[in-house]
Amino acid sequence: MAAALPDWVARDAALIIAARALHTFAQGALAVLLGVYLAASGLSPFQVGLFFSLGFAGTAALSFVSALASERVGRRGLLTAYTGLAALAGVALAASGDPLVLLAVAFAGAFTGAAGNVGPTQSLEQAALAGVAPPSRRTELFALYRVAAAVAAALGALAAGLPVALQSWAGMSELASLRLVLALLVGLRLGIAVLFALLSGEVEAARERREWVNPLRLPSRRRIFTLTGLFSLDHLAGAIIVRGLLALWFSERFGLDLASLAALFFGAQVVSVASLWMAGKVAKRIGLINTMTWAHLPSALLLLGVAFSPWAWLAVALLLARSLFDQMDVPARDSYIMAVVGSHERVAMGSIHILGRSAAGTVGPTLSAGVLQAAAFSAPLVGSALLKTAYVLLLWAMFKNVRPPEERERRD
């Protein structure tokens, strides 16, 4: 991984990018597999949605711990501990078919059904990356971080077809093949924990700032909580159609099998890589806020097209087109939220951001699954598109004049 990165990328940044790539490979596979696995284990569509909601709740709980304790306990220690907990939860997920156990595991392991854009380690990773990157390279570094994640998630989505191969080649049952692949993904979590343990002290907060954090007393608290509210609205829109439920929607609406779903979401991730790669270049030209807002409008319109598509081929084509815009705002957002607060506020900003997004996410999957179970199959997609449009308009109106330091310097 380090050899494939530019020379200006620090060793700690390379380790974090490699860890994120492994994480999103696992998440890319899980996002496609989990809905099918949980249904095969006997969970109803509503319980599948509840599982993903509890995963968001787990992410929120751990992110709250990060906001309070990261500057005191240390970013490296929390990164390692969270990854180890996820590995243990993965063991329980693969070993048990009891619905109550599975729902408890969802919370402990923060299994959201998303393809990797959220998680309790993300705010810690972002704060560490911002601390080891020069301001002029920060957005580019976050773009590399997201590109590596997207490529890995695409490969993970493709790997979600492995259970089908095991069923064909080894004669395994569907449930047994799914459990074997879930067990293999536990090994990736352990590898991620090793990478985090190798990080240097440069990723930590300044020594004089090693204290418990009260987010309500931070200098940038108004900005932090306002942005968190807006991003929570966006994430509620995304949580309504997390990949696990979107895969289930394609399966129920058009009868796509697991192999077809794996190929579809692999293709979507490949297209997303182009979107992420362009994000850094677009942001340098038009600014971070413009990049964050302008990419969302075509994404919302294309999602509406998916919702009303009468044919599978058209829905697939529109979903792939949407992928070109859907992730373009992500590196810009990562860079923006780290730039508009003080360096000692970065973990709090990232953690509260994820806490708010995860709290909103606890509602989305359960609501969406309830609607799906009631046979109103396209309603969640329409609702998601409308919420994303509202988010874009509010963000633009409230923050169009709040620029990061490097953009203010260029204008001056």
Image (cartoon, rainbow, N blue to C red):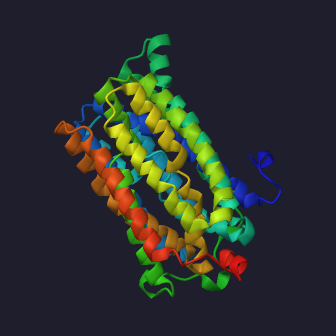
Q: Residue at x 65, y 72 (%)?
A: 204
The quarter of the image holding the C terminus is bottom right
Looking at the image, can residue 194 be seen?
no
Left or right, 389 with respect to 41, comes to right
Left or right, 346 with respect to 108, comes to right
Left or right, 4 with respect to 403, comes to right
333 or 22, nearer to the observer: 333
User: Residue 270: x, y in percent?
Assistant: 58, 37
User: Residue 255: x, y in percent?
Assistant: 32, 23
User: Residue 390: x, y in percent?
Assistant: 36, 62
The quadrant holding residue 124 is bottom right
Looking at the image, can residue 35 be seen?
yes
The quadrant holding residue 90 is top left
User: Residue 118: x, y in percent?
Assistant: 47, 55
Q: Is residue 351 above or below residue 341?
A: above
User: Residue placed farthest to the left in the image?
Assistant: 374
Q: Residue at x 54, y 39 (%)?
A: 269
404 or 356, nearer to the observer: 404
The quarter of the image holding the N terminus is top right
Q: Residue at x 52, y 40 (%)?
A: 26
